[in-house]
């Protein structure tokens, strides 16, 4: 296997890790005021992701850095074409991070309500736009002979990409509800469990439409397998969540996201950014890659440091594995997320 293929696969793995892990904390953020009745409930919800949400974002940074180093032309074309959308995602992530830290600084319902809305918006916007972005990457965008983006912002708002955005939004909301049911006790858990059926049903309908469109328009023969895995995993997640088997339900939603990423990257390969106007202008794993020497050095760095990062993050999840309830929330205000 060529190093270009290795790094295409590694970038797919990094995006898989990001979407699985950040997906559930996007879902928790979107449902913050939906699954809660008072500030204590909301602090329970925030504390389920407080120790891990910023670590989950590391996967995005590494995926972006790996793309820049391994496929610089891919990175350049993405940022030139998707600049506004990526800027909106970045601003939303910044506002969301600030909101987690600031919402408890003043003992005021109005103050907290404003930051709660910021958390919900800062979670929903990236959840939607990542799906739109990946839909456009798979579908292809207009590129000129120099591989520069030749469309407009409205070009990105096509039906297929918008369906992709609605799919990631619904799947992450369902993923988040299942995670809340897995990580909480009492009334918060009961409300999260009640929401798994409507959220799961929506995710199944939108996900099926998006994956079937992807498969028939852009897929290959082998990508039928992950399409079926995603469908079975989502149905199983809804069923097991209703039975109170949240661990199995969370495994199902995570597996559905993994399978969906396999379909997207499998449909994309060997392109990394197809040109919708002229196939000759497409970026591929070959013409968009760095030199073999650069890829070789990066491979050794990845071999050494990736296990360290995985071990640290696994340790973090193990330490904070227990359920959270209202009894764990102290009366004092002003404690940052994950420290109450």
Image: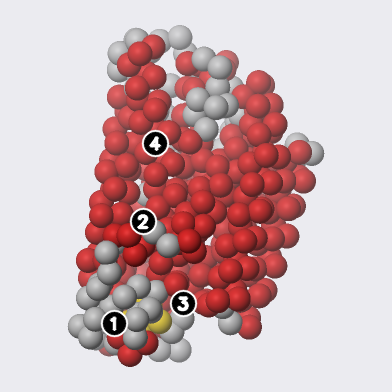
Q: Distance between the residues labelled 2 and 4?
A: 19 Å
Helix, strand or loop under label 4: helix
Q: Which of marks 3 and 2 precedes in the sequence?
A: 2
Camera-side residue of 85 and 159: 159
Provide residue 287's location: percent of width, then percent of height. Answer: 29, 87
Q: Circle 1 is placed at which residue position? A: 288
Q: Is disc 2 placed on a helix, strand or loop?
A: helix
Which residue is label 2 attached to?
60
User: Residue 78 at x, y = what percent?
Assistant: 29, 67
Q: Residue 121 carries which label?
A: 4
Residue position for label 3: 268
In the image: residue 85, left or right of residue 230: left
**Are dots 3 and 1 in contact, CB under 8 Å?**
no
Element under label 3? helix
Residue beneath the point at 69% across and 57% down: 233
Q: Residue at x 36, y 56 (%)?
A: 60
**Contact? badges 2 and 3 (CB < 8 Å):** no
Residue 65: quadrant of the picture: bottom left
In the rendered view of the protein, which quadrant contains the N terminus? bottom left
Rounded to the nearest angstrom, the CA distance separating label 4 from label 1 is 35 Å
Of 270 and 82, nearer the camera is 82
Can you tell which of label 2 and label 4 is closer to the viewer? 4
Q: Residues within 10 Å of mark 1 (few under 14, many from 20)?
A: many
């Amino acid at each position: 296997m060529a190093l270009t293929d290795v790094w295409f696969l590694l970038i797919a793995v990094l995006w898989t890790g990001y979407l699985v892990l950040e997906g559930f904390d996007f879902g928790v953020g979107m449902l913050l005021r939906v699954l809660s009745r008072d500030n204590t409930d909301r602090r329970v919800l925030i504390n389920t992701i407080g120790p891990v949400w910023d670590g989950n974002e590391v996967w995005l940074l590494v995926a972006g850095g790996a793309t820049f180093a391994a496929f610089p032309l891919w990175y350049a074309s993405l940022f030139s074409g998707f600049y506004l959308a990526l800027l909106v995602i970045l601003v939303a992530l910044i506002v969301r991070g600030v909101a987690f830290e600031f919402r408890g600084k003043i003992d005021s319902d109005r103050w907290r309500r404003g930051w709660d809305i910021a958390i919900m918006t800062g979670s929903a916007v990236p959840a939607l736009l990542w799906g739109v972005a990946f839909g456009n990457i798979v579908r292809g965008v207009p590129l000129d002979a120099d591989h520069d983006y030749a469309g407009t912002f409205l070009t990105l708002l096509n039906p297929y990409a918008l369906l992709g955005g609605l799919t990631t939004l619904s799947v992450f909301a369902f993923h988040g509800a299942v995670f809340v049911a897995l990580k909480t006790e009492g009334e918060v858990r009961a409300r999260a469990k009640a929401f798994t059926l409507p959220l799961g049903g929506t995710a199944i309908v939108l996900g099926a439409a998006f994956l079937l469109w992807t498969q028939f328009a852009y897929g290959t023969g082998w990508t039928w397998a992950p399409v079926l895995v995603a469908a079975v995993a989502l149905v199983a997640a809804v069923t097991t969540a209703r039975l109170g088997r949240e661990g199995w339900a969370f495994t199902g939603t995570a597996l559905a996201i993994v399978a969906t990423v396999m379909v997207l990257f499998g449909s994309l390969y060997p392109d990394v950014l197809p040109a919708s106007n002229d196939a000759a202008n497409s970026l591929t794993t070959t013409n968009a890659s760095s030199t073999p020497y650069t890829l070789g050095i990066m491979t050794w760095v990845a071999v050494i440091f990736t296990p360290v990062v995985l071990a640290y993050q696994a340790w973090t999840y193990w330490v904070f594995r227990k359920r959270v309830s209202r009894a764990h929330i102290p009366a004092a205000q002003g404690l940052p997320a994950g420290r109450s």
